[in-house]
Image: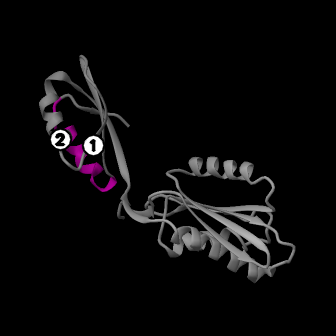
């Protein structure tokens, strides 16, 4: 399984109009379901006067964590088409919220599916797709005498120091691409006195 995935580099917006109904779409990069749900709650509060606030999100490089919601629209006419656009662009770590202002004319099931799909597509198309890598953080402790060996590993261009504390017992958290985490763990384990924390 690859640790590479695609998402948007920043929030973007789209709009779709059909028979006087307005669909405002917002695409927001997120890193967790918790973050996605916080954004959803904020949009529901902001657009409290809208008829429907529908949404879908996809999380993780494996693209196995996802959820969608029709928010009162007929089942499968809103959340699924929004999620379908995230899928067809091959994106993840992304939330799309579509706010509907009803214009007085019913769109029917197929009309709703098209409207939510197109609104979501507009929001994605307005954004900039980037390639990212799933990262893993490895916290560990080590004795001061092992400092040189540890810092040699930490200076690898593929490795980033997230936090460090030097005392009698030193602790560092390193970040590396998820694909390389196993190798870094084993290299750390070869250094005397290193204790990898999980």
The one nearer the camera, 124 or 73, is: 124
Task: Tell me residue 47's x, y (percent).
Answer: 74, 54
> Range of the magenta residues?
178-192
| Image quadrant in which the N terminus is located | bottom left
The kind of secondary structure element at disc 1 is: strand
Q: Which numbered dot is residue 155?
A: 2
Number of numbered tags placed on the structure image:
2
Picture residue at 66% right of the left edge, 52% below the top: 40
Q: Can you see residue 66?
A: no
Picture residue at 80% right of the left edge, 64% below the top: 72
Q: What's the CA distance linking mark 1 and mark 2?
A: 8 Å
Q: Answer left or right for 70 relative to 5.
A: right
Task: Tell me residue 22's x, y (percent).
Answer: 74, 70
Does 190 appear in magenta?
yes
Looking at the image, is mark 1 or mark 2 earlier in the sequence?
Answer: 2
Dominant secondary structure, magenta: helix
Task: Tell me residue 9's x, y (percent).
Answer: 44, 58
Q: Which residue is mark 1?
A: 160
Q: Which numbered dot is residue 40?
A: none
As displayed, is residue 5 above or below residue 180? below
The one nearer the camera, 169 or 190, is: 169
The kind of secondary structure element at disc 2 is: loop
């Amino acid at each position: 399984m690859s640790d590479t995935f695609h998402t948007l580099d920043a929030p973007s917006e789209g709009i779709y109009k059909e028979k006087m109904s307005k669909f405002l779409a917002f695409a927001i990069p997120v890193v967790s379901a918790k973050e996605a749900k916080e954004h959803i709650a904020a949009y529901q509060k902001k657009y409290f006067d809208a008829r429907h606030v529908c949404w879908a999100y996809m999380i993780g490089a494996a693209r196995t964590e996802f959820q969608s919601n029709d928010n009162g629209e007929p089942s499968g006419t809103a959340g699924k088409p929004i999620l379908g656009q995230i899928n067809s662009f091959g994106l993840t770590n992304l939330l799309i919220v579509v706010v509907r202002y009803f214009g007085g004319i019913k769109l029917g099931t197929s009309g709703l599916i098209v409207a939510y799909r197109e609104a979501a597509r507009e929001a994605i198309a307005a954004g900039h797709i980037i390639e990212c890598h799933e990262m893993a953080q490895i916290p560990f402790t080590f004795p001061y005498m092992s400092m040189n060996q540890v810092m040699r590993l930490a200076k690898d261009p593929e490795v980033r120091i997230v936090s460090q504390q030097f005392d009698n017992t030193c602790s560092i958290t390193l970040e590396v691409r998820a694909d390389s985490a196993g190798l870094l763990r084993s290299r750390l384990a070869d250094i005397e006195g290193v204790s990898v924390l999980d």
